[in-house]
Image (cartoon, rainbow, N blue to C red):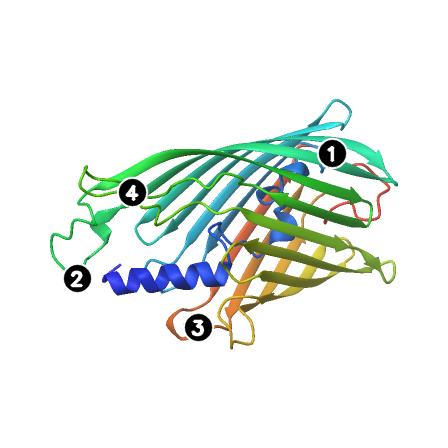
Amino acid sequence: MRTLFTILALFVLTLSANAQQDAQYTQFMFNKIAFNPAYAGSHKAPCLSGIYRTQWVNLDGAPVSQNVNFHAPLFNNRVGVGLSIYHDKIGPTNTWNYAMQYAYRVKVGGGDLSFGVQGQIRDYQVDWRDVKSIHAGDALYGFREDSKMIPNFGFGVYYGRENFYAGISMPRLLNNDLTFQYDGNIQNTDFSKESRHFFGMAGFILPTGDAVKLKPAILVKYAANTPLDVDLHASVIFYDKINVGATYRIGGFQGNAGESIDFILQLVFTERLKAGIAYDYTLSDIRTYQSGTYELMLEYCIQSKQKGTTNPRFF
């Protein structure tokens, strides 16, 4: 970041656009474990997935995020376990999150109802050398990199069946302090804290023939004192091999037509391997300062999923 004003503006835009502190993911429908620990083991096979996202390309200090997830079923699919690593960098902040998930599921109405918990450690880092204050030697800013380890935990509920899923979750329950204190003359005033984040998601498959399926989906994101964020998604699946979709993201500053319009293409190479790419076209005022957002997704499952399901590859 070149100036303090740029940093402050970027943080405000990020919180407004995402309506949260967590990283934004356009391909949420293929990355549910990042939002809901109860999803662990839902593939009914051990699966490894990863996402790389670069937001607002060509805007200095804009968010860059990655995550890697592994989850698997145990005990005849009654239990699911998962391990996730998330990395998010924006401006002078650099955050690593390490999370473990546990889910227990029961049969309800032809589907699986899962209850999940997760424990998380956040390695939160701020490199104050990237901040250029207006007044040289400002004591509010350090001249080194600071970091702290922050524990947290969360929960989720997820229901899935052949052609429908829905879930609610709160991945972080503790309002941990994110500020730093340099000496006894500067008090920690909790200027920055972790916020509780609520996620609600749902989607279903609507068959329209042997070759084509429609798949609407929705993701609702909310954190206190920030705008409600809603992703409205619809995609078309051709021959269970190609998924083409678009998302309209509502949120951010008032007065805009929305936050973004996102386009997604997913390819299923085999029953074990699939890949996706997404592009976000920004609708807010920040669109004149950047060149869009790109996201790549890859997933590999160690064994084929169970046969005979209505939607064997896209939930």
The mark closer to the camera, 4 or 2, is 4
Instruction: Look at the picture and state if 154 lies above or below 129.
Output: above
Image location of residue 43, percent across then percent down: 71, 38
Q: Visible in this render: residue 312? A: yes
* Dot 2 amino acid type: Ile
Q: Of residues 202 and 209, which is closer to you in this image?
A: 202
Judging by the rendered image, the residue that carries numbered circle 2 is 134
The mark closer to the camera, 1 or 2, is 2
Q: CA distance from mark 4 to mark 1?
A: 47 Å
Judging by the rendered image, the residue that carries numbered circle 3 is 287
Image location of residue 119, percent across then percent down: 54, 31
* Dot 4 amino acid type: Asn
Q: Quadrant of residue 169?
A: top right
Left/right of residue 18 with respect to residue 239 in the rendered view:
left
Counting residues from the start of the chain, the first of labels 3 and 1 encountered is 1
Q: CA distance from mark 2 to mark 3?
A: 27 Å
Left/right of residue 247 with respect to residue 282 in the rendered view:
right
Counting residues from the start of the chain, the first of labels 1 and 2 encountered is 1
* Residue shown at the point (72%, 42%) measured from the top left: 158
Q: Residues within 10 Å of mark 3 (few under 14, many from 20)?
A: some
Judging by the rendered image, the residue that carries numbered circle 1 is 44
* Dot 1 amino acid type: Lys
Counting residues from the start of the chain, the first of labels 4 and 2 encountered is 2
